[in-house]
Amino acid sequence: MRHLVLLTLALALTAAVPAAPAAKRKPLASAKVVECSKGITAAERVAVFRAAARKVARTDRMWIKFKLQERIGDARFRAVAAPGVGVWRRSRSGVRRFAVRQRVLALGEGASYRVAVHFRWYNADGELLRRARRLSPACKQAGALPNLRVTRVGGERVNGTVRYAMDVFNRGRAASGATTISLSVDGDVVDTPVLGPLAAGETRRVFVNGPPCTGSVTAEVDPGNRVAEANERDNSRTIPCPN
């Protein structure tokens, strides 16, 4: 009877001990930022991304390719070119794990960068076994950006034509570079004069002579997206005919 009691107690103690956690399995594919250096000069602004993959059944070689993406201000990420990016890197035959680093230099001020990494797995006959895609976290660079905005569009008749006036305000925290401003009357572009650099907080008026309006007038600053801005969605202003 004593032996039965001891055995029962031993079983109860065993049940109360929590099971050891299972070893965490490494992901099949991953993309990370391992360095995000910031600085005043372009040479100091550097990002290093790392992609890694582990083999699946029947894998002979693994391939990895980086694609760099950039976001300026509140715009969406878009693909950009960079040296060494967009090239397939191939593992040696038979390796269990394959990792590649991609270094990106001269990052832009006030912009964010990430990589979309493409993975492929091939068998010894060159047959594609599997593919995957991963996005890395972003490397965000410090720095202020300009933000050009058309704040006013007006017009005054002068001898059968209209002298249109467009006010452009830089509401950003940095000076803008030179660009252009486009004036459209009733849907047709009349002129696209040059707009010189604007300091942060500066407003400038630009004049264009054009035909009388019958419907609407649209002014759009930086129509070619030459200036990197904090907000690219407030560059255009449309109003009913001012004359």
Image: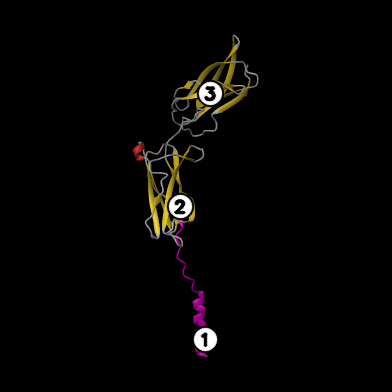
Residue 203's disc number: none
Of residue 170 and residue 193, the one placed in the foreground of this image is 193
Q: Hey, which residue is sitting farthest top in the picture?
A: 159
Q: Which residue is mark 2?
A: 119
Q: Badge 2: few (under 14), some or many (20 or more) residues near its Cα, within 10 Å?
A: many
Q: Is residue 137 magenta?
A: no
Q: Quadrant of residue 92?
A: bottom left
Local SS, label 3: strand
Q: Is residue 9 magenta?
A: yes
Task: Please state the extent of the stretch shown in magenta in the rendering.
Answer: 1-30
Image location (x, y in percent) of residue 69: 46, 42
Label 2 – label 3 distance at C-alpha: 44 Å
Q: Nearer the viewer, mark 1 or mark 3?
A: 3
Image location (x, y in percent) of residue 112: 45, 41
Label 1 – label 3 distance at C-alpha: 93 Å
Residue 5's disc number: 1
Q: Quadrant of residue 44?
A: top left
Q: Residue at x 56, y 17 (%)?
A: 164
Residue 182's disc number: 3
Label 1 – label 2 distance at C-alpha: 59 Å
